[in-house]
Amino acid sequence: MTADSGKDHRPYAKSLEEGFERALTPFQEFISDQRSGSVLLLVCTLSALLIANSPLAHIYEALVETPAGFVLGEWSFTMSVRHWINDGLLSLFFFLLGLEIKREVLVGELKDPQQSLPIIAGSLGGMLIPTAIFLAFNSDSETIHGWGIPMATDTAFAVGVLALLGRRIPVGLFTFLTALAIVDDLGAILVLAIFYTQSLNLSLLGIAGFFLLVLVGCNALGIRRPFVYFIVGALVWLATLGSGVHATIAGVFVALTVPARPKREPRWFVHEARALIDEFEKVETQSEQPVLGNNDQHMVVERVQDTAEKATTPLRRWEHFLERPIALFVLPVFALANAGVPVDVQTLAALATDRLALGIGLGLVVGKSVGITLLTWLALRLNLGRLSRNVTMRHIAGIGLLGGMGFTMSIFIAGLGFANNPDALLTAKTAILLASLAAGVSGYLWLRLRE
């Protein structure tokens, strides 16, 4: 007879399990905390910087440029490891962004015009003014291709810094920043699709559109199986990859086809759940078998899970499922592959007079702050909406500073704009890292000292 074959044959097993759960709980709480993803992202960024400025630099660069893929006879599909991360793995991040955008538009802050208009205005200011500053420095040079770099806000880092302030700031400020970053990301996605597409293969683009229509049809027919959206979504990604449009855009469009309505109404769930709970209780009281050997109990629990799934939306379930893997794996891996920037004193000194670096740095630190704060204030002055309870313009000024933490999206856009110019890419990445650091520190200090 095994240790689990009876209900209480080994009393110490229960206390051991409870002790393990108590030890595990702090780690679980750490994982679920917004700060954990930001801390891991920071660790990976610093690790990449240290490696790139150490004797291991050549090994690091060789590793991220190693070809990887699939070979079948004479047919092959290979890309560098960095390419797989930036075009493949990051598509999951864009898929999550698409889910968040759809949810915010349908039921979130962006649904209510009174709440959304100041956010949209602030986001537009945070895109237009940084771009104007960048163009002021680079409009007549080859580096003009990087104009989209200072438009971006790194949600993970910005929210992580905000979380460090805890109860010093109102809860509504988190909502404002998250919604602002979502609108900001939507703007960046449109810029990528329209302005950072080198050439178009209309046939493949048409194939991608066809598979998207298949997913729209699946949604209309009530098909909610994840594997259907995964398989057809992968075909959309492949077609988009070959079309000339950046493949990550496919993640956003696939996300927009995910069903946002439950299969059953809440009242049905209440009725079914109560009946199943009563059935479970009846089986429990009539049986002496342990849970492991009680098939009836297991069947009831599985029916409860199925009932709960029918009463929730795939959009919310998949969004919740992806949040931790994206925060704790996808973005840190992206940072490891892209933040490895060799830095020396001469390079840093040269940034002070480099037009590209100044356009990015001032665009992120000054442009974002001024743009977000000014246009949000202007929207409020024109009575175009209102701020959440307890949120003031002093808070918005702090959010404007945090908005200058471009990092992930900025580095991503820099990679597209300067793919054939390694020197400009190195300068851009260095400026992004320094500007993101300055924006994060100044935003944190502003919000902490102003309270």
Image (cartoon, rainbow, N blue to C red):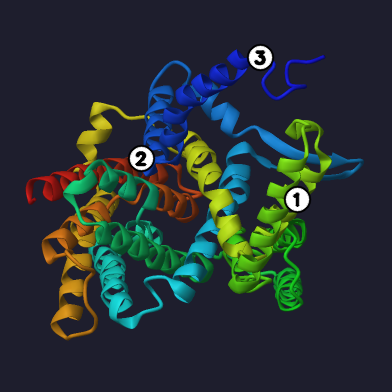
What type is the residue that disc 1 sits on? Val
Could you tell me the amino acid type at mark 2?
Arg
> What residue is pinned by disc 1?
300
Q: Nearer the viewer, residue 22 or 162?
A: 22
What x and y, as percent, mark residue 219?
71, 73
Residue type at the position of mark 3: Arg
Of tags 2 and 3, which is closer to the observer?
A: 3
**Label located before the other in sequence (1 or 3):** 3
Q: Are marks 1 and 2 in contact (CB under 8 Å)?
A: no
Sequence order check, earlier mark of 1 and 2: 2
Residue displayed at 32% across by 74% down = 120
The image quarter containing residue 163 is top left
Q: Which mark is residue 35?
A: 2
Residue nearer the viewer, 286 or 392: 286
Using the rendered image of the protein, determine whether residue 386 is visible from the camera's viewpoint: yes
User: Which residue is located at x 34 percent, y 51 percent?
Assistant: 406
Q: Which residue is mark 3?
A: 10
Where is residue 198? Give x, y as percent: 57, 64
Identified at 69% across, 53% down, the residue is 305
- Quadrant for the N terminus, please: top right
Compared with 292, 400 (above or below) is below
On the picture, is 10 further left or further right than 132? right
